[in-house]
Image (cartoon, rainbow, N blue to C red):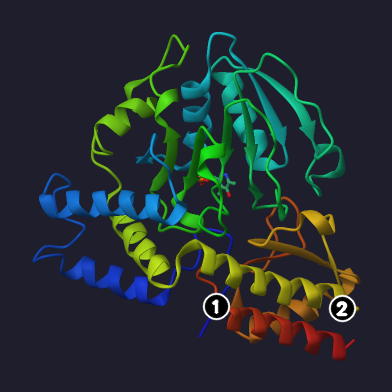
């Protein structure tokens, strides 16, 4: 038995692994891996994945959902290309590696990026709050959860500008108001399914309004929406497993029930980080992520002892991202609270041995 705290690709519900495995062997007589994406059986999977996404997120009328290959990294480019208007100027909040990546890709396709708020000067250990948003921007982009640093927006930027968000690592983890956004995107492999598909939730009004002189067909969200996510071969298996996972999410009470479970998991771990004399949190308390809890040892010389303890307990995926070090416990939807209890017990044992 392993307790997987990995940051992505990450744990999915065990029942989803079983159903996915069954589909590899037998999906209406073929393997899901060999079925034509144009076959009505797979078209039904795609339609259900889109419908369940709308149900789970409460996507209102006037919005479309589409799955595209290429990861959230391609989403950086797709967001910029689809949201740029005549001014070609956008505001970005820089809260970490992924936000920085989004900024760079926007600049590469000709957006004049105004980084009006950033926590870079403090190694991205907090979420900027008291900023003023400049005038004349085409859109505002931010990253709702900073997977690497372990910070999360607990209140979203308040603006009349079209709001664009990379929600890769906290989508489906808590209730959101989709109507606040013009575009949401999320790579599948953090809370949705295996890597391969990226989810886009887009306001229909924004489709077809790009000012870019170069908009490849594949990067035009209007095309993907009109072709019902079937412009070319979609990431069939990723969408299939995402659909199974969404069925499971909804069967267990949907996003609101998930949010309560996630709150309980995060509280259990952060309470221990704060109580335990051997550990400290890595980021500003009020900005702590409920998906990726980062923490540090007070005494770095004990690292080998702690590593031996958690590895011995069957925990995997606990080291922090290679760029920041320390520890990161990812508490994605499918991680059971029992796994958090195992980690907390290990932390207590480590304290006793100090
Ligand atoms: C993982 C991650 C990405 C990158 O996703 P890929 O699918 O690997 O391109 C981007 N943004 C955030 C917030 C992430 O957590």
Q: Which mark is residue 275?
A: 2
Residue located farthest toward the left when viewing the structure as drawn: 29
Q: Earlier in the sequence, mark 2 or mark 1?
A: 2
Res 141 quadrant in image: top right
User: Can you tell which mark lies on residue 336?
Assistant: 1
Q: Residue at x 36, y 72 (%)?
A: 17
Q: Is residue 209 left or right of residue 352?
A: left
**Residue 3 in view:** yes
User: Local crowd at mark 2 within 10 Å, few (<14), some, or many (≥20)?
Assistant: few
Up-down relation of residue 224 to residue 353 (above or below)? above
Residue 191: give x, y in percent of width and height: 49, 59
**Residue at (13, 49) in percent of width and height:** 36
Q: Is residue 5 visible?
A: no
Mark 1: give few (<14), some (14-19) or many (20+) Cα within 10 Å: some
Of 97 and 181, the residue lying toward us: 181
Residue 233: give x, y in percent of width and height. Answer: 23, 40
Image position, residue 232 (x, y; %): 24, 35
In the picture, measured across the screen, residue 297 lies left or right of residue 248, that is: right
Whole-Å distance between the Cαs marked 2 and 1? 22 Å
Do the CB atoms of the residues marked 2 and 1 lie less than 8 Å apart? no
Closest to the observer, 87 or 196: 87
- Element carrying mark 2: helix
How far from the left and from the top, in percent, is residue 98? Answer: 63, 41
Residue at image position (42%, 53%) is 195
Identify the mark at residue 304; answer none if there is no mark.
none
- Total marks shown come to 2
Which element type, helix, strand or loop, lies under badge 1?
A: loop
Q: Residue drawn at (25%, 49%), measured in percent from left and top?
A: 47
In which quadrant is the C terminus drawn? Answer: bottom right
Respond yes or no on whether mark 1 lies under 8 Å from ligand 1. Answer: no
């Amino acid at each position: 038995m392993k307790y997987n705290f990995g940051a992505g690709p990450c744990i999915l519900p065990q029942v989803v692994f079983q159903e996915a495995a069954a589909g590899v062997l037998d999906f209406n007589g073929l393997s899901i891996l060999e079925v034509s994406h144009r076959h009505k059986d797979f078209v039904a999977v795609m339609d259900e994945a889109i419908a369940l996404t709308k149900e789970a997120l409460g996507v209102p009328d006037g919005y479309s959902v589409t799955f595209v290959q290429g990861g959230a990294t391609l989403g950086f480019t797709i967001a910029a290309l689809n949201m740029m208007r005549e001014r070609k100027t956008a505001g970005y909040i820089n809260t970490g590696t992924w936000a920085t990546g989004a900024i760079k890709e926007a600049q590469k396709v000709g957006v004049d990026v105004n980084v009006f708020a950033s926590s870079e000067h403090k190694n991205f250990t907090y979420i900027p709050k008291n900023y003023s948003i400049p005038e004349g921007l085409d859109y505002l982009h931010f990253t709702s959860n900073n997977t690497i640093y372990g910070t999360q927006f607990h209140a979203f930027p308040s603006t009349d500008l079209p709001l664009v968000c990379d929600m890769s690592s906290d989508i489906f983890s808590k209730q959101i108001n989709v109507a606040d956004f013009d575009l949401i995107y999320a790579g599948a492999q953090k809370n949705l399914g295996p890597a391969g598909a990226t989810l886009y939730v887009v306001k229909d009004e924004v489709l077809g309004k790009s000012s870019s002189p170069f908009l490849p067909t594949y990067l035009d969200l209007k095309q993907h929406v009109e072709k019902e996510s079937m412009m070319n071969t979609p990431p069939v298996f990723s969408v299939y497993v995402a659909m199974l996972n969404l069925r499971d999410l909804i069967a267990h009470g949907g996003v609101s029930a998930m949010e309560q479970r996630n709150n309980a998991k995060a509280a259990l771990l952060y309470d221990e980080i704060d109580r335990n004399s051997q550990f400290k949190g890595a980021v500003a308390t009020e900005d702590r992520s409920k998906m990726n809890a980062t923490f540090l040892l007070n005494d770095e010389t004990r690292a080998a002892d702690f590593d031996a303890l958690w590895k011995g307990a069957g925990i995997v995926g606990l080291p922090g991202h290679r760029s920041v070090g320390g520890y990161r416990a990812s508490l994605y939807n499918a991680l059971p609270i029992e796994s958090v209890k195992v980690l907390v017990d290990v932390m207590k044992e480590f304290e006793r041995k100090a």
